[in-house]
Amino acid sequence: MRTTCHPTPHFLIFDLIYTKGNIMSDYEFLTVEHEEKLTIITINRPAVYNALHSEAHFEFDTAFDDFAADPDQWVAIITGAGDKAFCAGNDLKYQAAGGSRERPTSGFGGLTQRFDLEKPVIAAVNGFAMGGGFEIALACDLIIASDNAVFALPEPRVGLAALAGGLHRLPRMIPQKQALGMILTGRRVPAKEGKDLGFVNEVTSQEDLMTTTKRWAGMMLECSPMSLRASKQAVYKGLDEPSLQDAIKSVYPSVQSLFKSADFVEGPKAFTEKRTPSWTAE
């Protein structure tokens, strides 16, 4: 199947060629691979510590659009090329040179304002996750970090602010004083401290990062994709409700879809028959 992405402002049209098992594309700033039902998206600008500029944001917008729309892809991992950086954030040299500041409506890295993505996304942080790079990781559902990973929101040090979600996601994930301690100083937090604070799920070696991240993805892929989507939507939308009672009583579209799905029948049936469920995401 041959697909062309939606038009983008004046500078970017992509033509993607899909083949079974993997995606071959003419992306310039990222790579996308399929491993059965797992999508792996790699930020591919290692020469600038995987910092992102306008063109890259639109590429990521397309990649995540494709992941969201593909019924055969259930979980995604996002990581960075090389062994130094996950993503150093905004490409400040590009911006200082007068480069375009346009971004898709889905936000930094095509993800930070993508509030309707029900499928799980895991960040495999392989080095520096600074500014917008940290905000991409915070927008993911899990963060697995290599032991050399470093996290920071250093925007105030260059006259900016972490407006791609960092100022709002971080205080919702860790204690407020600890969040403000990072936000108001721009200080760098190593992976182990990130786990102690609670925004990192697991710390592993650089060599084992993808193996560890795929282990987490594998555990997700053992579950019903419809259940995962219902659970993710209920968690995030429930946190927006004013009380626990309101959150529990709210009606979530993905939960309603779960109740109507084949997975809702298959799970109890497979349990009763003592066999592995055959999920269909339908």
Image: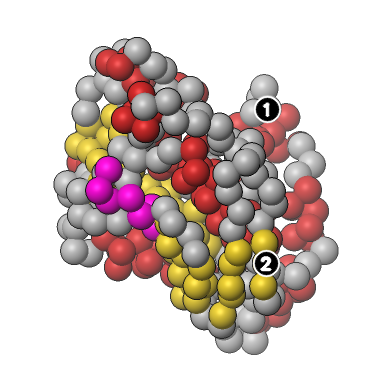
The amino acid on which the numbered mark 1 sits, given as a three-letter code, is: Glu
Residue closer to the observer: 216 or 63: 63
Mark 1 is surrounded, within 10 Å at the Cα level, by few (under 14), some (14 to 19) or many (20 or more) other residues, namely some
- Range shown magenta: 42-48
Crowd tier of the residue under label 2, counting other residues whose Cα lies within 10 Å: few below 14, some 14–19, many 20 or above? few
> For the C terminus, which image quadrant?
bottom right
Residue 117 in percent (x, y) is at 63, 49
Along the horizontal axis of the image, is 108 left or right of 131?
Answer: right
The residues tagged by marks 1 and 2 sit, at their Cα atoms, a distance apart of 39 Å
Task: Classify residue 227 by image quadrant.
Answer: bottom right
- How many discs mark residues in the rendered view? 2
Q: Which residue is mark 2?
A: 3
- Tag 2: residue type? Thr
* Quadrant (top left/top right/bottom left/bottom right) for the N terminus: bottom right
- Do tag 1 and tag 2 residues touch (Cβ < 8 Å)? no
In the rendered structure, the answer to whether residue 81 lies left or right of residue 39 reads left
Does residue 96 sit above or below 50 in this rendering? Answer: above
Residue 245 position within the rendered picture, expressed as x and y whole percent measured from the top left: 70, 30
Q: Is residue 20 magenta?
A: no
SS class, disc 1: loop
At mark 2, the secondary structure is strand
Q: Which quadrant holds residue 207?
A: bottom left
| Residue 80 image position (x, y, % from top left) | 33, 53
- Can residue 134 be seen in the rendering of this structure? no
94 displayed left or right of 259: left
Q: Name the residue rendered at 43%, 62% in the picture.
A: 31
- Residue 83, placed above or below residue 33: above
Q: Which residue is mark 1?
A: 241
Image location (x, y in percent) of residue 213: 35, 61
Instruction: Please give the label number shown on residue 133.
Output: none
